[in-house]
Image (cartoon, rainbow, N blue to C red):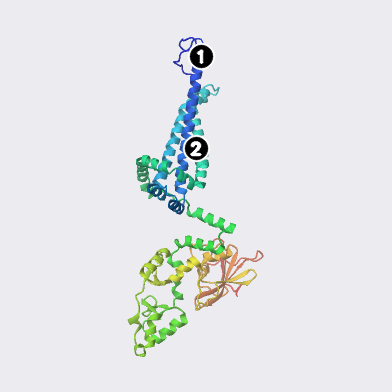
Amino acid sequence: MWRESSRSCDECLRPEGGCCGSFAGWDSKVDDWLSNLALFFGLVLAGAFFGAVGTALVSVRRSRIRELGEQNGRLSRRAMALLEDPSLAAAAAHTLGLLLWLLAAATCAAGPGRWLGALLERSAYAPVSANAEALGILIAVTLTGILFILVAESFSRSIAAHQSERIALKTIGVSALVSWLMKPAVRLVAAVAGALLAPFGAKVRLSWPALTEEELMVLVEAGEEEGVIEEDEKEMIDSIFEFTDTVVRQVMVPRIDMKVVDADTPVLEAVSVIMESGHSRLPVIDGNVDTIIGIIHAKDLLPILASPEKREVSLRDIVRPAFFVPENKKVSELLAEFRSNNRQMAIVRDEYGGTAGLVTVEDLIEEIVGEIRDEYDHEEPLITIQDEDAWVVDARLNIDDLNEQLDARLPEDEFETIGGFVFGTLGKEPEVGDSVEFNGWRMTVQEKEGRRLRKIRIEPRREDEEPPTTGEGGKGEQSASAGQSASG
């Protein structure tokens, strides 16, 4: 099994195989074992080192690096630039670390893998002995992969993530050198990967965020549990993350709640409408809400009130241009447009060109900081406790807010408001006393204004009660009743 050595015996000066030549091959094999293992573990440690460097570079806080750069004059501009944008250096370090691990696997396959195959040749089990060399290599490479996961992925990167600042600063010279040496290889790999992923609409990124949105939210929740972050602060952070996914339709004042003034309304009467509404701006319509010609501002009416001779001026002459937006526009984009265009109000159009509602800067800010009330706001709370296990809610209440408050688990995809859910589930125009059920909750129409739902009573259905008869809109667990059971 062992290869013949070309060494001579030092004592008898005869070729190997003579008096003590049988030990020479063994000594040579031991040397091969030690050198192979030394090379293998050297490659393993080097791969783990460069993997840790790459992790440290993408984990280090940029703000902290800037602070250290100002305090530490020894950091060169090149080093600071590398730490400010470490994407290429991190990719180069990770690529080099992976190459070293592949070399370690090849070394293990060429040395211990073949030696293990030689041992397996002695197996009495024919399939093992027949494929001994391949099995030996497979076992060696598998053990190398396990070692890679334990050392590189779990151990070295965990240390690098917790000591990212220290490691990044200590290895800045090595990182710069590796970045320069591996730049062509990294660019080549990125180009090939980009070409392969292009048909699927994916892009290759050399950089990645140190913290994902999900990880950051976990940290926020942990901070609240530890008392570092207050509950209202956490709610504001949650609202900021949700803000970018919210569309105008979800925050606008619906068409039916809009306060408007006709273009032919006398100025004094328009002033009265503004004072009663409590708003400083009102849309001006030309006959109906779908024909909005502009916005009237209370400040524009003050000079007219001060000059009696100007009171005959038409609203058409002082109206300001209206700003129109689609109802599916992201509120984050709308807020940016409000700021750049110095606007405070926008008219929301539906897909058919009709007026869906209006939205103001205050509506957008309230999505982050919560409800803002001034001296003109006298609205009732959206949720009030009526009995021990019953609540009366405004039909305009968003379903997601209701689910958050009462854990009702109502579907949030089909309907925006609880009133819309009741209407859609019944499948007909609701009357006072009509009720629907879903997931063990009974929702009963308690108050209407014309055709519009105003108040809905919500209560858990008792187990001894029989469910209402299923209505036209009922599906699955939801049911409806047109009777007067559970009215106000």
Extreme-right residue of the structure: 464
Towards the viewer: 467 or 385? 385
What residue appears at the point 40 percent right and 87 percent down from the top-left corner? 268
The image position of residue 340, as x and y in percent, is: 36, 67
* Image quarter of residue 476: bottom right
Residue 258 higher or lower than 107, as above or below: below
Mark 1 surroundings within 10 Å by alpha-carbon count, few (fewer than 14), some (14 through 19), many (20 or more) = few
Assess whether mark 1 and mark 2 are in contact (beta carbons under 8 angstroms). Answer: no
Disc 1 element: helix
* Type of amino acid under label 2: Phe
Towards the viewer: 142 or 442? 142
Disc 2 element: helix
The image position of residue 121, as x and y in percent, is: 51, 22
Towards the viewer: 435 or 408? 408
The image position of residue 352, as x and y in percent, is: 37, 69
Q: Nearer the viewer, mark 2 or mark 1?
A: 1
Residue labelled with disc 1:
22
Residue labelled with disc 2:
148
